[in-house]
Amino acid sequence: MKPSRIFIIVLLIMLVWLQYKLWFSPSGLPQYWRMKDQIEKAETENTALQARNAQVVAEVENLKQGNDAIEERARKELGLIKNDEVFYQIVK
């Protein structure tokens, strides 16, 4: 055989081997696709957490600035009323 033929055969064998590793090995494309899905899920979760954090920061700032937010929270969560108010409960 000619050396150029041997070189071409070796190159073809290497190409087949590299393609096999790319498509079928655990560290090839299947892992890339799994990691891509994990990244997308993490980004979605991070976006939701950032929105929640922004809401909490806004609420903390609101509570620091005045009594209106504290009063509103006491009314909603604890059912409190002021001394000069009358509470009416409608039962159906």
Image (tube, rainbow, N blue to C red):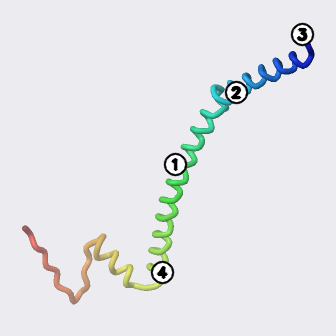
Q: Which residue is mark 2?
A: 19
Q: What is the three-letter code of the residue carrying label 3?
A: Met
Q: Which residue is mark 3?
A: 1
Residue 24 to residue 66: above or below: above
Residue drawn at (29%, 73%), measured in percent from left and top?
Answer: 76
Q: Can you say which quadrant of the picture contains the C terminus?
A: bottom left
Q: What is the three-letter code of the residue carrying label 2?
A: Gln
Is tag 1's residue or tag 2's residue first in the polypeptide sequence? 2
Name the residue at the top extreme.
1
Is tag 4's residue or tag 3's residue first in the polypeptide sequence? 3
Distance Cα–Cα, label 4 vs label 3 = 86 Å
Q: Position of residue 38 (x, y in %)?
A: 55, 44
Q: Are the residues at dot 2 and dot 4 in contact (C-beta closer than 8 Å)? A: no
Q: Residues within 10 Å of mark 2 (few under 14, many from 20)?
A: few
Is residue 75 shown left or right of residue 41?
Answer: left
Q: Secondary structure at mark 4?
A: helix
Q: Secondary structure at mark 2?
A: helix
> Which label sits in the foreground, 1 or 2?
2
> Which label sits in the foreground, 2 or 4?
2
Q: Which residue is mark 4?
A: 64
Distance Cα–Cα, label 2 vs label 4 = 61 Å
Which residue is at the front of the view, 17 or 76? 17
Distance Cα–Cα, label 1 vs label 2 = 29 Å
Residue drawn at (45%, 79%), measured in percent from left and top?
Answer: 62
Which label sits on residue 41? 1
Q: Quadrant of residue 21?
A: top right
Is tag 1's residue or tag 4's residue first in the polypeptide sequence? 1
Q: What is the three-letter code of the residue carrying label 4?
A: Lys
